Amino acid sequence: MNLGLSRSRWPLRSFLTLRFCDSLCFFHKGSCVFQEEPEVIWLTFDNMHHQWLLLAACFWVIFMFMVASKFITLTFKDPDAYGAKQEFPFLTTIPELEKWREEKHLPKELKPTGKVLSGNRLNQPLVHMERLELLKNVCRDAALRNLSHTAVSKFVLDRIFVCDKHKILFCQTPKVGNTQWKKVLIVLNGVFPSIEEIPENVVHDHEKNGLPRLSSFSDSEIQKRLKSYFKFFIVRDPFERLISAFKDKFVHNPRFEPWYRHEIAPGIIRKYRRNRTETRGLQFEDFVRYLGDPNHRWLDLQFGDHIIHWVTYVELCAPCEINYSVIGHHETLEEDAPYILKEAGIDHLVSYPTIPPGITAYNKTKVERYFLGVSKRDIRRLYARFEGDFKLFGYQKPDFLLN
């Protein structure tokens, strides 16, 4: 059947060919005419043309959105995650500090415990130089000498762990994330291949963890390591650290160390509890009264090395006598940990374990809550003992508790 329709009279774009029922079907502007001879069907799609264009436009928009998302991700991703190489100039001498400030247009006074332009690792060397400069200045202050200086005794040398393979000394300051740093050193010493494989009961077992103490070496070997090794330790707001020690040893006691509750707590209660009719276990106010007592040392001698969890940083690490390379802060550990690893030259070998968001931040509300039932007199006596720690490491005096 020939209807006199000629393909040549219609634009080629108006047709689509399909094989269908041995007939030729012409669709043109809504009408269909069959021709039985060919096996090809022509379908017009003038009315579909705009739909195809719209579909193509949608795909283009989606493609561009994906490209833009990838660009944003790459732009804002922190390239200096733990263990990643950091490329920036390191300052190595204190006199360069003023020049650095002038070039970067930074203020003369910076809080040593805070972040400089938060998240910008380029300022990490300046932050740590500020901390060391502050430490040296306070160490020179004769008025604070009794609070800032101590002998490098066996007690101090027992706190310092040694990694001879990478020439590192780490001074342990409990309740500031030291367990994780011990794991880092255990891996570096080759005792375990990775942090994840270290059993928790091994970390603090000094017969199994493969961490020699500096006190185990001869005097000449000790001096050689103190002079040439990379040395660091970590600090935290002194009062918040005491709260952590109290909770860990006298409330939760997760590692099951019964002597804290059954021997140390009763000793503190007998001497420092004012209300003798009180039958509860050790309370935080009892703990504060013990720590703030100028005559606390006779009880410390009875407790032995267990006091490491609450004695001052000065007593633990002798920061004015030992020339430490870096002093990390618990509050900025997310930035400080990779910096320490890089400065020690081990960032390509091991990473500090992941830090849950916000876990290291200073919690003023918690501090206020714990000190709520403590007298101002006892708080002032406590501060008098830990004043050296506050000033040496740039922590603000807790006037909200003292006044």
Image (spheres, rainbow, N blue to C red):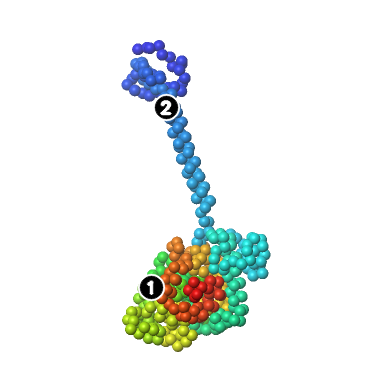
Q: Give the secondary structure at mark 1.
A: helix
| Left or right: where 171 falls relative to 107 | left
When asked about the image quadrant of residue 143, the answer is bottom right
When asked about the image quadrant of residue 122, the answer is bottom right
Q: Give the secondary structure at mark 2.
A: helix
For residue 201, which numbered disc appears in the image? 1
- Residue at the far bottom in the pictured view: 298
214 or 139, which lies in front? 139
| Left or right: where 278 falls relative to 100 | left
Q: Residue 227, can we see it?
A: no
Residue name at image x 48 percent, y 37 percent: 60
- Residue 9: x and y in percent read 46, 15
For residue 118, which numbered disc appears in the image? none
Q: Residue 323, can we see it?
A: yes
The amino acid beneath tag 2 is Met
Q: Nearer the viewer, mark 1 or mark 2?
A: 2
Q: Earlier in the sequence, mark 1 or mark 2?
A: 2
Residue name at image x 43 percent, y 82 percent: 290
On the rendered image, what quadrant is the N terminus found in? top left
- Other residues around mark 2 within 10 Å, as few (<14) / some (14–19) / many (≥20): few
- Residue 297: x and y in percent read 47, 86
Residue name at image x 37 percent, y 18 percent: 31
Marks 1 and 2, Cα distance to the nearest angstrom? 72 Å
73 relative to 395, above or below: above
| Left or right: where 246 falls relative to 334 | left
285 or 333, which lies in front? 285
The amino acid beneath tag 1 is Asn
Residue name at image x 47 percent, y 87 percent: 295
Residue annotated with mark 2 = 48
